[in-house]
Amino acid sequence: MKAYSKILCAHDMSECSSAALEQAADLAARFGAELIVLHAVEPLVLPAAYGLPPDPLVDYERIACESATAHLKPLIEQLAARGLRVSLRVPWGSPADEIWATVAREGVDLVVVGTHGHRGLKHALLGSTAERILRTCPCPVLAVKQSARAAA
């Protein structure tokens, strides 16, 4: 089995991404790898067609990134308490694009993502970030399926 030195785990605040994080943490512990937890804050799409301009008094990007950081910080601290080398990234942008950029910039050699396992209409409407990452990521990707117990 290949030894990994830098593992990135994408976390979208869902139960399946928490399962993926636990898998990534186990792998990081096994290989002595650095673990990067990444949550990309997607840009807000405003209904400009209805004549609603962006509110310059609200800094959505800053507020959303701070909120995501505050939510994930306890998870990072728990992982660090287990002896893992772990860091958090909360960039602004498309999740797939930010994962690819981080892989390239930081020399990540394994990406771990959770997948909801949606099919049919739900998949067509919601899309699949995990699928885009699996198809195009330049390094190996481990997709962790949401368990039946977590889905219940």
Image: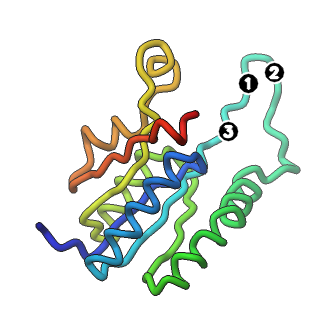
Residue 138 in percent (x, y) is at: 21, 52
Point out which mark residue 44 bears.
Answer: 3
Q: How many marks?
A: 3
At x 53% / y 66%, what residue is drawn? Answer: 89
**Mark 2: amino acid:** Gly
Tell me: 132 left or right of 71. left
What residue is shown with label 1? Answer: 48
Point out which mark residue 117 bears.
Answer: none
Colour mode? rainbow
Tell me: 16 left or right of 73. left
- Residue in front for this viewpoint, 64 or 22: 22
- Residue in front for this viewpoint, 97 or 152: 152
What residue is shown with label 2? Answer: 51
At x 31% / y 73%, what residue is drawn? Answer: 6
Q: Quadrant of residue 49?
A: top right
Q: Which residue is at the far right?
A: 57
C-alpha gap between disc 2 and disc 1? 5 Å
Q: Which residue is at the far top?
A: 121
Residue 104 in percent (x, y) is at: 29, 62
Disc 2 to disc 1: CB gap under 8 Å: yes
Within 10 angstroms of label 3, few (less than 14), some, or many (20 or more) residues?
A: few
Tell me: 65 left or right of 38. right
**Mark 3: amino acid:** Leu
At x 58% / y 46%, what residue is drawn? Answer: 14
Q: Nearer the viewer, mark 2 or mark 3?
A: 3
